[in-house]
Image: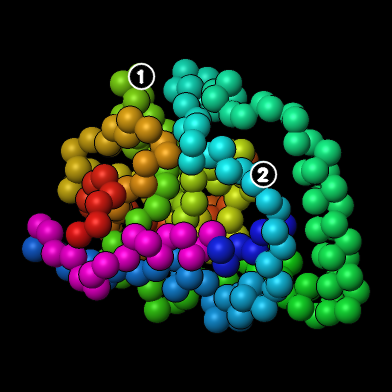
């Protein structure tokens, strides 16, 4: 299993400024790993990375389309070439053996890592703070015109759909604040990241798709750009 810290590192590409001002409000720019407790972050960073090769390399080359009618992904755009299955299986076996040896030799590290992957520990200092964060959208509620009103914000594309969900403290349940946005927003492609600004709360939500340890009332939702 690829170390989750690599996924967090990907989102670091989004950061550029510390404060964003809009509608007379200031939003503190934060990074995803800041939402994790120091204990959880240390546990993930201590876990040796395991290389899975090119298992998900086609994500960048062949964007997956979202079917809005039945709320599912169009698997036809995913790579179905099985010519390298033998090599992939051999790599998976080698990775599994390496992981098993690590768990045997360092059980405390493995235990802490497993706990961090399902952790609901939050950073209380962010409760009721206005923040700005970049991430990817997992729609939860939308209308016939594909106007999204409620969604999970996650740090990497495909989370909760084709890839396992991140830890709960790396998932934010977002609802549109009608005082700032009189309706939801439309997103043409779900593999495109967005900037979300609003008030963050430390609030647990459990659903059939995932569990989130944070909620956010969105004041501004905009396409991602390096600003």
Q: Secondary structure at mark 2?
A: loop
User: Where is mark 1, residue-wise?
Assistant: 144
Left or right: residue 91 compared with residue 148: right
User: Where is mark 2, residue-wise?
Assistant: 55
Q: Say which of 54 and 39 sits in front.
A: 54
Q: Say which of 80 and 173 sits in front.
A: 80
* Chain part drawn in magenta: 7-23
Q: Residue at x 85, y 77 (%)?
A: 107
Q: Is residue 145 above or below residue 51?
A: above
| Residue located farthest toward the left when viewing the structure as drawn | 24
Q: Horizontal and vertical percent for residue 89?
A: 83, 43
Query: How busy is the neighbourhood of tag 1: few (under 14 within 10 Å), some, or many (20 plus)?
Result: few
Residue 14 falls within the magenta-colored stretch: yes
Quarter where residue 190 is shown: top left
Quarter where residue 14 is shown: bottom left
Q: Horizontal and vertical percent for residue 163?
A: 62, 44
Q: Residue at x 40, y 79 (%)?
A: 125
- In this view of the protein, can residue 218 be seen by the observer? no
Q: Horizontal and vertical percent for residue 22?
A: 12, 59
- In this view of the protein, can residue 56 be seen by the observer? yes
Left or right: residue 82 compared with residue 127: right
Quadrant placement of the N terminus:
bottom right
Per the model, the C-alpha gap separating discs 1 and 2 is 34 Å
Tell whether label 2 touches label 1 (CB within 8 Å): no
Q: Horizontal and vertical percent for residue 211?
A: 58, 52
Q: Residue at x 50, y 32 (%)?
A: 62
Q: Is residue 51 above or below residue 19?
A: above
Query: How busy is the neighbourhood of tag 2: few (under 14 within 10 Å), some, or many (20 plus)?
Result: few
Q: Is residue 149 above or below residue 224?
A: above
């Amino acid at each position: 299993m690829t170390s989750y810290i690599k996924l967090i590192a990907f989102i670091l590409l989004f950061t550029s400024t510390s404060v964003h001002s809009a509608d007379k409000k200031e939003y503190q720019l934060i990074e995803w790993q800041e939402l994790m407790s120091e204990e959880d972050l240390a546990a993930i960073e201590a876990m040796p990375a395991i290389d899975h090769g090119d298992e998900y390399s086609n994500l960048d080359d062949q964007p997956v389309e979202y079917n809005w009618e039945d709320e599912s992904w169009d698997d036809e755009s995913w790579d179905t070439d099985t010519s390298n299955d033998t090599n992939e299986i051999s790599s998976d076996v080698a990775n599994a053996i390496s992981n098993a040896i690590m768990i045997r030799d360092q059980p405390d590290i493995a235990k802490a890592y497993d706990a961090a992957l399902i952790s609901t520990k939050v950073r209380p200092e962010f409760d009721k703070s206005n923040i700005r964060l970049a991430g990817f959208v997992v729609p939860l509620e939308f209308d016939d015109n594909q106007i999204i009103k409620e969604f999970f914000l996650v740090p990497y594309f495909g989370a909760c759909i084709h890839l396992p969900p991140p830890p709960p403290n790396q998932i934010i349940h977002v609802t549109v604040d009608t005082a700032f946005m009189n309706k939801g927003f439309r997103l043409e492609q779900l593999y495109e990241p967005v900037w979300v600004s609003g008030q963050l709360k430390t609030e647990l939500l459990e659903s059939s798709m995932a569990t989130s340890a944070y909620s956010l009332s969105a004041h501004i939702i905009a396409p991602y750009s390096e600003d």
